[in-house]
Amino acid sequence: MRLFKKKKEGEELFEGQGSSVDSDTPVEEEPTVAGAAGPEGAEPEPDDEEAAAAPAPAHPGRGFFDLAPDEVAGYHAPATLMVPRRRIPWKPIAKVVGILAALGLVAALVVLLWPSPGGGLPDYVGKTVTEAMESARGLGYHPEVSRWEYSHKHSDGVVLEQSPAPGKGVAPGTQVALVVSKGARPEAEPTVTVDTGAANGSTPPVNPFAAKVVLIDPGHQSLPAENEWSDPDMTRRVPGEPSLRGISTGNLEDRVALDIATKLNTLLGKDGVTVVMTRDKGDIDLPETTRAEMANDSKANLFIRIHMAGSKDPMMSGVVTLYPAKTKYTKDFYEKSKAAALLIQQELVKATGATDYGVEDRHDHVAFNWSHVPVVESEVGYLTSPADDLSLDDDAYRWKVAQGLRNGVIKFLQSK
């Protein structure tokens, strides 16, 4: 419209000055350029292909400014193509996507649920727990020692039962529960008849540890730990610590600690020591204060806690044994606790060959402050260290750890 107004104004100006312009005066014509528009209102000639594709103009021979007002609405510029809008076929696309998703789901179910080759789950009964676990892991199963039982027929570490049963077709990733022997019950072991010396009035030999009680506490649990009071004076609330997880294996601290504690229970039981375990499973809610109360109630000669350590330095590996600092809560058993820590650390290093980080006293451990009996905490490796994590994943190494703890405990009991 602006161009239209300018044209009208130009025509009026020209008409107003028409009397002053000499009609005989020649008017210079502007040179035309090839390809440029012709006379005013004329359109450039289109190519043959464009002319064939372009729709016929509604008012041939006339431009937009030549139209009457009632003809403007129906005007179409020459060579203008109106491309129709194409609709996307969503329904067929959605159908194809749905079919592909269904096929993927079926394939995943086949992989997960297809029975394992080779006639099903092998028979692990009668094999050592190390052999059984290595075989099960190699086939893609998740073996786990569900419990340990006394057995008169099988020695330590021999599989007594398994679930699922041998020969059953199970999918990879299935958990395989093993019941493992911990040897003959100490009081039921066959005894050797010896000369007791009763004829000459001498005292027959007795078990030197018959009256000794050791409480073993496998650290942590699978359930979340709650906040607790740090000491009997309820000085402050201490948040519960979650289990560490092995940096290489992913093993949880509470499970590794329970396995070592069970092995230590077996070894001390053979020595004739009365053993009390704070827990024999992971899915339990057992606060630190309750664990200390169990040691107090059992009048334990030693309260030994089994844990793993953690560090921001993945190269840090080894063992350390903690004992309570001397405070008003621990002054009555501080000396005995320190003596036990020194003996256990020495034997633990000797049995495992691990780096010796010595012993440390701690004043902020809830179980230490609530205990009334000698107490130590052995941190038997760093789960943040790939080397220690892989060592603790080995059943034979865990037996070495248990043997070192046992030797230290026995030396402490003999020293009292």
Image (cartoon, rainbow, N blue to C red):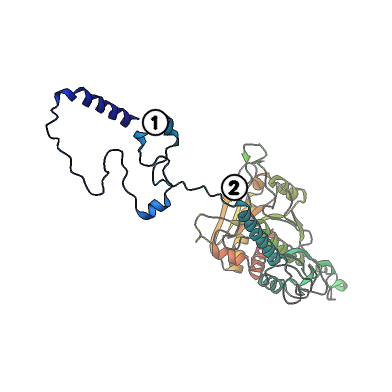
Compared to 73, does 269 lie above or below? below
Disc 2 element: loop
Residue 34 lies, in percent from the top left, at 23, 49
Disc 1 element: loop
Residue 36 lies, in percent from the top left, at 26, 46
Rendered-image quadrant of the C terminus: bottom right
User: For residue 306, which quarter of the picture?
Assistant: bottom right
**Amino acid type, residue under disc 2 in the picture:** Ala
Compared to 412, does 118 lie above or below? below
Rendered-image quadrant of the N terminus: top left
Label 1: which residue?
Answer: 68
Dot 2, crowdedness within 10 Å: few (<14), some or many (≥20)? many
N-terminal of the two: label 1 or label 2? 1
Give me the disc on residue 325.
2
Taking the image as shown, residue 392 lies to the left or right of residue 60, namely right
Dot 1, crowdedness within 10 Å: few (<14), some or many (≥20)? few
| Contact (Cβ within 8 Å) of mark 1 with mark 2 | no
